[in-house]
Image (cartoon, rainbow, N blue to C red):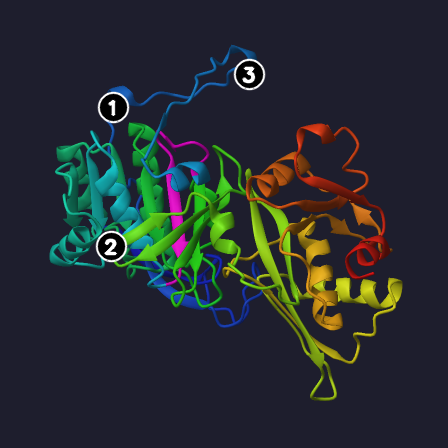
Amino acid sequence: MAKSKSAYFCQSCGYESAKWLGKCPSCNEWNTFVEEIIEKSNAKVPSWKTSSGSQRLSKPTRVDNIQSIKEERLLTGDQELDRVLGGGLVAGSVILIGGEPGIGKSTLMLQLALNISGKKILYISGEESEQQIKMRAERITAVPTAECYILTETSTQNIFKQIETLEPHIVVVDSIQTLHSAHIDSTPGSVSQVRECTAELLRFAKETDTPVFLIGHITKDGTIAGPKILEHMVDTVLQFEGDRHHVYRILRSIKNRFGAAAEMGIYAMHGNGLRQVSNPSEILLSQRDEELTGIAISATLEGARPMLIETQALVSAAAYGTPQRSANGFDTKRMNMLLAVLEKRCGFRLSTRDVFLNIAGGIKVEDPAIDLAILVAIISSHEDIPVSSKICFAAEVGLSGEIRAVNRIEQRITEAEKLGFEKIFISNYNRKGLVVEKYKIELIAVRKIEGVFSILFG
């Protein structure tokens, strides 16, 4: 009988220690070590077994002797998901999807399983019963496909037995924290169990060229629960974001070995499931009957997708001694930097004012091209002068007040023109190489922030 021993694992990063430690030497977190019983055996048989004839000894190969094979992608029928994945599913890829409870991860994956035609999908659930999944499937679609199979199981050994019998084309696991392997004598959801179960599914995916979706829980800090090595093991990490009190959901790519890691998909949550939002610019721009102060439109990029977003600012007299600085959907430190530019370079006294900033639609933007729109919205609220809703902005602002160029300006201009804007403010350095005649929208090239304010506010 194999001798069992215990070890201590950090619940934050997965660091293993022979004794309990107050502070983790790897991630410097306090009081994160828990004791787990582990099994040490000389010959551990993996859950996903391969025949002896298929095992081969790897040998080094010169890179020019390796044959290039064009990867074939499977379209899921969900254009937003295909875009985030880089064009579709790659055979043998392992995709990890994380998000807050109730945000719609299970609904998104069940829709995927029900909408793919001609492929056998195995949906493994360790959290819900078959009746619960059936009720959700009936709510999502009126005609559930017969190629979607539901398995309520948490043991990886039993799961792989059913996989060998069914031979599915795609596997969905909801969730990885509920699975447990008999090779590890610890509770489901622990660091060692999550790592072992993911390793078994990873071996299965690579040996059979079967795509595997893993749904992962997140911690109170917003990170995916389990060891950090979990995100290194998988091929793609997706984050499902949004507010449960709002209708829109955002699927972001954090890591992608088969595509860009900056793509974004937008969904709208309805009573009958998630619906794709093909034109996010229309939902991110509010319909205004009259011109309002403190609002400016910016042309931004999320991955390869251009979008127009509405930046809202409110400047008011500070009710307390220390002015408040609050930003929703934008980096507060960068907003403070832009406020310092306004005060130093343009002479606006905002040190005694409360400044509140909001990106409409509940999305988070890190693109520096919205700097100019943020400054215009702040000054519009401060001076109580509205900015025309037919004007948009696409430029970065430097610390000396200069208007800096941004990348892929042609896509931003085209998106603004498509939505009916009449003018767009860009950097003078972006104007070089542009064929102005092919655009119907008026391009206003500026060098300094003072020039923008003189054109807009006189």
* SS state under label 1: helix
Count neighbours of disc 1 (C-alpha within 10 A) and say few if under 14, some if 14 to 19, many if 20 or more: few
- Mark with earlier residue (2, 3): 3
Amino acid bearing label 1: Ser
At a point 74% along the width and 72% down the height, the residue shown is 382
Is 427 placed left or right of 12 in the picture? right
Pointer 1: what residue? 52
Task: Name the mark on residue 262.
Answer: none
At a point 39% along the width and 41% down the height, the residue shown is 81
Q: In this orientation, does residue 108 appear? A: yes
* SS state under label 2: loop
Pick whichever, 345 or 458, lies toward us. 458
Is 11 placed left or right of 358 in the picture? left
Q: In this orientation, does residue 405 appear? A: no
Amino acid bearing label 3: Val
Label 2 close to label 3 by CB (< 8 Å)? no
Pointer 3: what residue? 63
Task: Name the mark on residue 272.
Answer: 2
Quick one: which residue is furthest to the top in this view?
Answer: 65
Q: In the image, which residues are magenta?
A: 85-100
Pick whichever, 400 or 206, lies toward us. 400
